[in-house]
Image (cartoon, grey):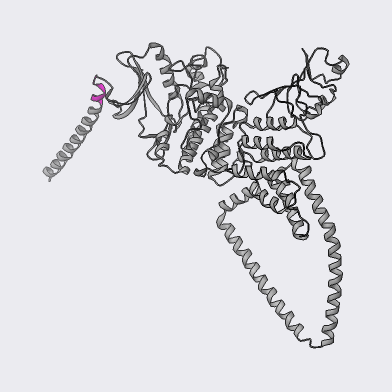
């Protein structure tokens, strides 16, 4: 028995010894690998080259995995070492699941700087868009992740400034990563000098204003206007603009600008962007997202989204079935979206309503049947005769009363239609024209002998619905006979819902301003067009055309508008009518359809400041004009500076102006 006990003990000790030896061997192998001298990164395979930098796939012998290594090429000048390393340090300090992680920063045996980062397998967003293999909703979800990453960077006061499809990596399972922070910049430079790097995260004096090439900062086509300007201030809205460009590419599979770098620069600085929905009508781009893109790509930073979060939330609203803040959706759109979000509940409610309607209809039908049976039981001929006479008398009385009412009603309809097209059109043009047509059609139905076809055609002409206008002109009177050939001509030219800006300008040139009410017609067409046209790029050409028709002798003047600066320069002493004052016009200037901060009207025939007193201008130059009365200046809503000529106005008149107004005499 003792032999058996000692035998069991020996076997157990032997087993424990073997397990301990095995454990020590395993631990010893890893430890020995780490102690071995030699290169940490091996098996390099170049993945991409660009400029002075290259990216390779390498094996990290210490962690036992493959990583991506970014390093400068051997012929890179030493001036690039520090910016390259700062890009690595910048990326390493941004910790976000959608931003590439940096693992190691160092120098090669040859003294060249490098850094290693996650090796992500997948394609760039540019490749994904070219292959067109990802559905739009999935791309929008990736865009939201991209916004989250940039929003995080902005919370750390870091701007990317080089967002483009090639710098966005899309993984095989939908992962999104932002790469290449080489143009990264601190938002502002008010951090205290002399602080530790780790304490303030980044030193703006060392990081800002550096690129690896020392040339243009960014990629034309994805750069905001301020990035092209020498002293342009880069803010969070600069990245918002680039995100708008990316959203444009996601929706259309095309960049927002095409052409040479110089052509793209000019288009960007002028804000000449065709919305994706208009540029690619066959792609069925939703109006809500189209509006989001155009707001993000606003020429002025203050007109863009205030933050990346606001841009992201608008895209989220679209994906969730809500309207976007950028599109200013009307009631019908909101109702349609509500139905889309709550389709099942709406169908149940509709079914319940139908049950009530059908039940009520059956009840009424049965009730009517009972009434018929009761009437059939009355077989006395005398009673029927009396009832028939009484009914006949009531009918005659009712007919007489209705004839009187319809005469009054028809007059009201005429008056309402006229008032809608005369005054209400200037405050709500779309609704005014629609209601005017409704009133005229109701009048035609009530009184067929009254021919209102020409008036209905006139309303369709204002809407640029020339097909509808032609139909009513052909069957109407000759009240607008001069409009008939114009309507037929431009109806044949129109290819979309509306004429182009230049086509409409040509149409304005063909209207006979010597005929009564043709100048008011031009203003009505202008105010309606401005209300419904989405892309107003180049709208100054249409405004100039209207002013030219109102001032036929103004043939050698000047009209120079800069939308980026908000300035308008006018010249020519024959430019006298800045507005048409009549009971059929608004009395306001068509210049109100342009964003003007500075109006230079030197030497023009401007004689009445009432013509322009509603314009939100901040600076007004009226030297050499025919203005004699300065009292309307008190009604300008935003005027800060008034420029007049020496001796142009008596000193007592200038003294009556508000103290807050700066008067410059030159």
User: What is the x, y in percent for residue 664?
Assistant: 77, 14
User: What is the x, y in percent for residue 165?
Assistant: 44, 31
Q: Quadrant of residue 594?
A: top right
- Taking the image as shown, residue 59 lies to the left or right of residue 287, namely left
Which residue is at the far bottom? 380
Number of numbered discs overlaid on the protein picture: 0
Q: Quadrant of residue 92?
A: top left
Residue located 72% across and 30% down the image: 547
User: What is the x, y in percent for residue 467?
Assistant: 63, 49
In-front residue for pair 480/609: 480
In-front residue for pair 579/649: 579
- Taking the image as shown, residue 26 lies to the left or right of residue 538, namely left
In-front residue for pair 236/221: 221
Residue 268 counted in the magenta span: no
- Taking the image as shown, residue 325 lies to the left or right of residue 600, namely left
Which residue is at the far left? 3
Q: Image height check: is 415 above or below 16?
A: below
Residue located 73% across and 52% down the image: 476
User: What is the x, y in percent for residue 268?
Assistant: 55, 26
- Taking the image as shown, residue 97 lies to the left or right of residue 579, namely left
Q: Is residue 638 visible?
A: yes
Magenta stretch: dominant secondary structure: helix
Query: Which quadrant, please, contains the C terminus?
Result: top right
Q: Image height check: is 180 above or below 176?
A: above
Q: Is residue 329 visible?
A: no
The residue range painted magenta reads 31-37
């Amino acid at each position: 028995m003792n032999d058996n006990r000692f035998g069991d003990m020996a076997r157990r000790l032997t087993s424990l010894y073997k397990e301990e030896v095995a454990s020590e061997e395993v631990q010893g192998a890893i430890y020995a690998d780490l102690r071995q001298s030699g290169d940490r990164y091996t098996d390099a395979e170049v993945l991409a080259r660009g400029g002075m930098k290259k990216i390779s796939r390498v094996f990290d012998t210490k962690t036992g995995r493959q990583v991506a290594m970014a390093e400068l090429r051997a012929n890179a000048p030493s001036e690039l070492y520090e910016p390259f390393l700062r890009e690595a340090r910048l990326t390493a300090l941004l910790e976000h699941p959608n931003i590439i992680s940096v693992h190691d920063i160092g120098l090669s045996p040859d003294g060249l700087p490098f850094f290693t980062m996650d090796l992500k397998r997948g394609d760039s967003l540019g490749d994904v868009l070219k292959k067109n293999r990802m559905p739009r909703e999935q791309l929008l979800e990736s865009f939201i992740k991209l916004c989250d990453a940039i929003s995080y960077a902005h919370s750390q006061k870091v701007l990317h400034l080089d967002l483009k499809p090639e710098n966005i990596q899309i993984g095989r399972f939908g992962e999104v990563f932002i790469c290449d922070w080489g143009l990264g910049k601190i938002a502002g430079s008010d951090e205290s000098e002399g602080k530790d790097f780790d304490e303030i995260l980044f030193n703006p004096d060392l990081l800002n204003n550096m690129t690896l090439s020392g040339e243009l900062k960014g990629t034309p086509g994805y750069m905001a206007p301020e990035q092209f300007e020498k002293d342009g201030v880069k803010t969070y809205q600069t990245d918002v603009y680039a995100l708008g460009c990316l959203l444009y590419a996601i929706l259309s599979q095309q960049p927002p600008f095409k052409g040479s770098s110089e052509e793209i620069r000019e288009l960007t600085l002028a804000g000449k962007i065709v919305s994706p929905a208009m540029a690619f009508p066959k792609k069925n781009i939703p109006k809500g997202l189209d509006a989001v893109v155009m707001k993000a790509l606003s020429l002025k930073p203050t007109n863009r989204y205030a933050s990346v979060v606001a841009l992201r939330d608008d895209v989220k609203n679209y994906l969730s079935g809500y309207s976007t803040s950028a599109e200013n959706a009307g009631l019908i759109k909101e109702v349609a979206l509500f139905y889309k979000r709550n389709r099942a509940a709406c169908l149940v409610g509709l079914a319940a309503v139908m049950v009530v309607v059908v039940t009520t209809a059956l009840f009424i039908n049965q009730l009517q049947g009972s009434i018929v049976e009761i009437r059939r039981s009355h077989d006395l001929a005398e009673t029927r005769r009396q009832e028939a006479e009484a009914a006949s008398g009531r009918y005659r009385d009712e007919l007489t009363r209705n004839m009187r009412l319809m005469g009054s009603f028809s007059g009201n309809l005429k008056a309402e239609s006229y008032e809608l097209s005369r005054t209400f059109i200037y405050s709500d043009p779309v609704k005014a024209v629609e209601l005017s047509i409704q009133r005229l059609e109701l009048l035609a139905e009530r009184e067929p002998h009254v021919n209102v076809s020409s008036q209905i055609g006139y309303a369709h002409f204002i809407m640029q619905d020339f097909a509808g206008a032609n139909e009513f002109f052909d069957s109407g009177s000759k009240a607008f006979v001069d409009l008939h050939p114009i309507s037929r001509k431009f109806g044949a030219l129109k290819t979309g819902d509306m004429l182009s800006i230049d086509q409409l300008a040509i149409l304005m040139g063909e209207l006979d301003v010597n005929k009564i009410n043709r100048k008011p017609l031009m203003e009505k067409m202008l105010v309606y067009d401005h209300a419904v046209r989405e892309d107003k790029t180049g709208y100054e050409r249409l405004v100039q055309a209207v002013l030219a028709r109102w001032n036929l002798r103004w043939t050698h003047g000047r009209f120079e508008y800069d939308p980026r600066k908000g300035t308008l320069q006018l010249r020519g002493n024959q430019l006298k009518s800045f507005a048409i004052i009549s009971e059929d016009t608004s009395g306001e200037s068509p210049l109100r359809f342009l964003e003007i901060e500075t109006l230079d009207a030197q030497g023009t025939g401007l004689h009445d400041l009432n013509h322009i007193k509603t314009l939100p201008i901040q600076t007004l130059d009226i030297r050499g004009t025919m203005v004699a009365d300065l009292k309307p200046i008190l009604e300008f809503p935003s005027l800060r500076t008034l420029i007049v000529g020496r001796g142009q106005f008596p000193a007592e008149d200038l003294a009556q102006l508000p103290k807050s107004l700066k008067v410059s005499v030159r």
